[in-house]
Amino acid sequence: MADLLNDEPRVVSAGVDLFAAALAAQAVPVTTVDWRPPVAGTSDDLARVLADPRRPEANALALSRMLEAGADLVDVRPASEVLGLEPGQFLHAGPPVTWDRASGPLRGALIGATLFEGLATSPGEAEALLAAGSGSSVEWSPCHDRGGVGPMAGVVSPSMWLFELADPVGGRTAWCSLNEGLGAVLRYGAYGPEVIERLRWMASALGPLLQAAVRRRGPVDVKAIVAQMVQMGDEGHNRNRAGTLMLLRDLLPALVDSGAPSSDVAAAAAFIGGNDHFFLNLVMPAGKLQTAAAAGIAGCSVVTAMARNGTDFGIQVSGTGSAWFTAPANTPSGLYLGAFGPDDANPDIGDSAITETIGLGGFAMAAAPAIVRFVGGSVPDALATSRLMYEITVGENPAYAFPILEFRGAPTGIDVTLVARTGVLPQINTGIAGRVAGTGQVGAGLVQPPMDCFTAALSALAAAVPPPASE
């Protein structure tokens, strides 16, 4: 096309780069557009959903609710009190799954929880009880179905203590278990004696101490800490160092003033301060509150949950309520601990992808370029990934601003229509669990959801579009 002022030839190139490169070599000004055809087989569903007159307003409402949602830590209590869990009832990460399809880490975590609750005296006895199916005295269901989230295997049992968060704007609540640290821990499927002993200490000492501190201090503004940590080099999924230390700063005076023995306070402070991932278990329920605020809006194509159980990856979408759209989970690629390697890795697992669902984690790697030393890749990769995620989201969250991108807000509100239209999948950075029950963590890396989750959700949205009035 000709420039209207000076008639210089200018070209817009979309698609294959070869054409643009040839023009540039001839000194012809060229603007490239990153265009891709829609994902194969989605054209009809896309056309129907994009034509839904409810969608623009529904997505705008979802975004506004997500941005307005707050997150305050208001209490720390046992799951039996928070959720009414009874002996033999467990919760887990990801969409529903039966024992016969459960991954090694999930099986290991359920075995450990059974031992922790005293329902079995040996791993073999616990496994037999869990494998008995409908005739046994145990049952499990997704954390998301009870309004909360669980890291990695995500297993929660009645005696485990939970962080309770509240949204002062929408009045909703959410919860998550306390973080155990790294290595051989229950959430990675380990269930050795040291794992059970740590869980007992967390239930008998750490949980009550945190409860006393929160009740003495009053609510902790978790959203405000997240906003600060993003500007201090944390991305909220695999890097939570600044967030953990800010939480400890807020709680330590109340811990010291609680009247508990100084040795117990010192042990709790050392455990929190020495566990850079402790704050992750507060970012996650804060994310759940943010996405829950956008749930249940008719015609809305915004994703409200991404979660994995180690076998399946599942998403939920605002306009389709609590329905899960699942496909086989992919296996992360990344960096491994010690002698572990790719053959030891289990497919993707955990509810922690709620962080990416709100624009943190893999979406925020531009704000935390040092994360590449933990999950792999390079600093340019981290910057490019964050920029790419704006292409599949409906807006930005100014509360979570990325300094290196001129304080641009986090890409927020994954839209299934944009995923299908561009072929761009959400980027997740995550821990890697060993595929064999009892192994624990074997590394950390990067992974993407299967596209089939998004195309299935798109089909469901298309089926729910009301016919035109003339029909």
Image (cartoon, rainbow, N blue to C red):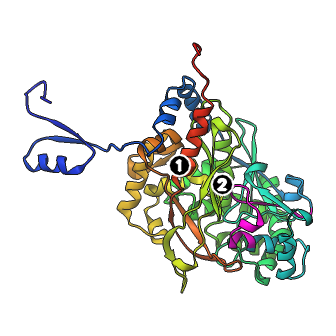
Query: Rounded to the nearest whole Å, what is the CA distance between mark 2 and mark 1?
Result: 12 Å
What residue lies at 66% left-to-right and 77% top-to-bottom?
440
Judged from this view, the residue extending furthest toward the bottom is 339
Q: In the rendered view, tell whether residue 19 sits above or below residue 298.
A: below
Would residue 221 be found to the left or right of residue 207 on screen? left
Callout 2 amino acid: Met
SS at mark 1 in the image: loop
Is residue 262 at least partly visible in the picture? Answer: no
Q: In the rendered view of the protein, which quadrant contains the N terminus? A: top left
Q: Identify the magenta region.
A: 87-107
Q: Position of residue 143 (x, y in %)?
A: 75, 55
Q: In the rendered view of the protein, which quadrant contains the C terminus? A: top right
Callout 1 amino acid: Gly
Q: Position of residue 208 (x, y in %)?
A: 85, 64
Q: In the rendered view, tell whether residue 55 sits above or below residue 356.
A: above
Is residue 86 at least partly visible in the picture? Answer: yes
- Quadrant of the image occupied by residue 38: top left
